[in-house]
Image (cartoon, rainbow, N blue to C red):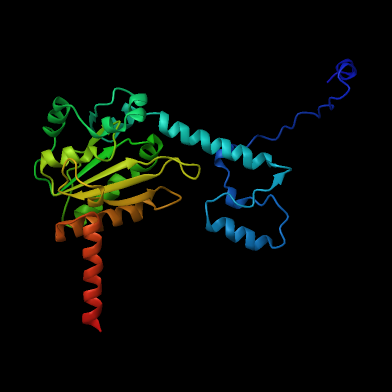
Amino acid sequence: MSPAQFKRNPHCRRVSPIDPTPLVDPYQQKQHQQILLTPINRQKLLEMKIATPARIGLGRCGTRYLTQPRLKFLADHAAARDAVLTEVTPKFIQQLGLITAQTTCQNKQDYLKNPPKGRQFTATALQQLTSQLPQYATIQLIIGDGLSSAAITSNLGQLLPLLQHTFKKAGTPIDRDHIPFIKYARVAAMDAIGATTKADVVCMLIGERPGLVSANSLSAYIAYRPEVGMPEARRTVISNIHAGGTTVQKAAQQINAACQAMLRYHLSGVALKQKLASSTKTSQRIAN
């Protein structure tokens, strides 16, 4: 600020020289590593912050957040919006060798405003898709963009090879050349595909609704011989698959274990959970 400008605006503060220190991207900052307060027990606060992704111990200035937590909040919110509004690129889908199909949604806005459309295919689209898939597969894998394109691009490249290896080792190899990618997909889109192809187990990997903790969380929805209109209780879900949650290595093991249990008991969802719990109790009684 020049002397003349300061004279015209005496209440303005003089601006200090520009700080040459590079700015840090708030989205890349780990809030659990930041201690912005002067706590009585710094170590205990640090342990609490490490134990949860929740925003605790942020500090305040009057009734407002401090600058760093505020910027981190805005950055996380922007990342969540981007995950919802952006789309998985055709190049990424092509690199993974996936078969492309689309639900009855016309575009992203249509998908967001009309959830039922994301569960349905036109008769032509369903016929074209299922004609490229194997009939009576033991395990049919499906990819859906869902509500987070970031979940697909961040996790799928690592998770697919792990699943392929894990299923093969279990004696139930998947057909890697016939995995569909469903654009504008909701979870129930898997039902029409499974019912038409008569697959024993259908597993859909889909991007979950992002939040302020993670914008790239993937979930696996798995069902034994799904049918259109079936209750949600028939699905088994493995969620929170991302680097800060369930790792892709652990997810591959859990998905495989769920699929093998479905093939063994011919059940999925709540019924499978109850069956496994009953089998565990029986085994414990025999052991005792």
| Residue toward you, 109 or 93 | 109
- The residue under the point 40% across, 44% down is 217
Q: Is residue 188 left or right of residue 52?
A: left
Q: Residue at x 16, y 42 (%)?
A: 194
Q: Position of residue 269 (x, y in %)?
A: 24, 54
Quarter of the N terminus within the rendering = top right
Name the residue located 89 percent from the left edge and 15 percent from the top edge: 4
- Depicted 8 relative to depicted 222: above or below: above
Residue closest to the eye, 144 or 225:
225
| As drawn, 54 above or below 63 | below
Left or right of 248 in this view: 47: right
Q: Is residue 288 above or below residue 183?
A: below
| Left/right of residue 173 with respect to residue 63 in the rendered view | left
Measuring from the top left, give residue 209's x and y in whole percent: 40, 40
Q: Position of residue 49 (x, y in %)?
A: 58, 55
Residue 81 in picture, x, y percent from top left: 47, 32
Q: Quadrant of the C terminus?
A: bottom left
Task: Determine whether, in the image, residue 47 is placed left or right of residue 179.
Answer: right
Determine which quarter of the picture holds residue 189: top left
Please report the residue visible at 64 percent of the width from the left and 52 percent of the height from the top: 57
What is the count of numbered marks? 0
